[in-house]
Image (cartoon, grey):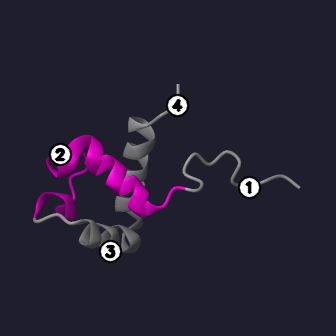
Amino acid sequence: MSNPQANNPLHGKTLEHIVKSLVDYYGWDGLGWRVEIRCFTHDPSLKSSLKFLRKTPWARKKVEDLYLFTFRQD
């Protein structure tokens, strides 16, 4: 039986890890500029961002796509 997660580059990465990595790389200002959502631009915090992203699939997708783009393996 094949592993359904074998081709998923986000397998094993938590949302918290993804957001922390992006904040470390871009900072809150840079992240808010690249993904224009309020939780990154107005009084950002990891806790509030995770809460919003877990409830909002379209925003989570944008953050995951930015993570994949930023940390892509060539």
The amino acid type of the residue labelled 4 equals Gln
Q: Residue at x 24, y 42 (%)?
A: 26
Residue that label 1 marks: 4
Name the mark on residue 73.
Answer: 4
CB contact under 8 Å: marks 2 and 3: no
Q: Disc 2 and disc 4: Cα gap in Å?
A: 23 Å
First reached walking from the N terminus: tag 2 or tag 1 = 1
Q: Quadrant of residue 39?
A: bottom left
| Direction from residue 60 to residue 74 in the image, left or right | right
Name the element at disc 4: loop
Q: Position of residue 15 (x, y in %)?
A: 43, 61
Q: Quadrant of residue 30?
A: top left
The amino acid type of the residue labelled 2 equals Trp
Name the element at disc 1: loop
Span shown in magenta: 13-42
First reached walking from the N terminus: tag 4 or tag 1 = 1
CB contact under 8 Å: marks 1 and 3: no
Is residue 21 rendered magenta in the image?
yes
Q: Nearer the viewer, mark 2 or mark 3?
A: 3
Q: Disc 1 and disc 3: Cα gap in Å?
A: 27 Å
Q: Disc 2 and disc 3: Cα gap in Å?
A: 20 Å
Residue that label 2 marks: 33
